[in-house]
Image (spheres, rainbow, N blue to C red):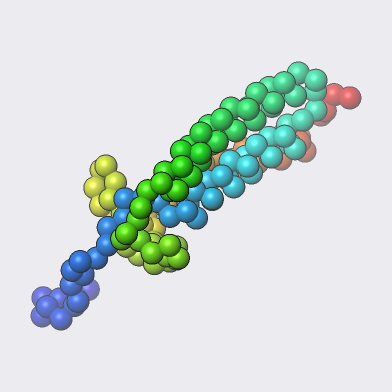
Amino acid sequence: MTTPTESKNLPVGHNRPVNTALHPLVYKTLVGLVAWLVLSIWLLFDGTHYIELIVAMITVFFVIATGIPVLIWMTWRRRAAHPDRPPDETFRLWATQQFRAWTGDLSGGAAAVQVLLPIAAVSIGMTVFGLVYYFDVPHLS
């Protein structure tokens, strides 16, 4: 804990960049987590003839749900000029900067966690459910 006299000596972050877009690594991680989710569904819940159609429809849904935003992001990234962001900005540097969201400013690392946490929880949870289903439920042959 800093005392009032010590806080006067702390550096003040003037003119620090504020990001309004996620780092490309966050988008790539999102796509990877969705691929993990779909792959775990395909590998662990396959077994009967009726489940294959359901799993195929789940796959189509996730391909569309991730494909459209990825295409929009790629188009926006190709056409938008980012004079304030160097093209080789590392994730570590981006995570330490401020991120402006609709609800207020937060660190880039906190923004990445808030974006990735729901799909990571679903991917891990579905894998655990699939492993329990695979090892505990007797399969019909």
Q: Is residue 128 visible?
A: no
**Residue 112 in view:** yes
Q: Residue 89, position in %: x, y?
A: 42, 65
Tell me the residue at 60%/33% (across/down).
63
Above or below for 102 versus 133: below
Percent position (x, y) of residue 77?
A: 43, 48
Quarter of the image where one finds residue 83: bottom left
Residue occupying image coordinates x 80% and y 23%: 48
Q: Is residue 35 above or below residue 62?
A: below
Looking at the rendering, in which quadrant would you find the N terminus?
Answer: bottom left
Task: Tell me which residue sits at (54%, 50%) in the image.
Answer: 28
Residue drawn at the location 69% of the way across and 27% of the way down: 55
Residue 134 in percent (x, y) is at 76, 36
In the image: residue 41, left or right of residue 68: right
Picture quarter with the C terminus: top right
Q: Position of residue 79 (x, y in %)?
A: 41, 46
Q: Nearer the viewer, residue 140 or 46?
A: 46
Q: Residue furthest right?
A: 141
Identify which residue, 117 or 31, lies in the foreground: 31
In this rendering, position of residue 136 left or right of residue 86: right
Instruction: Give the number of marks.
Output: 0
User: In which image quadrant can residue 8 be found?
Assistant: bottom left
Q: Is residue 93 left or right of residue 138?
A: left
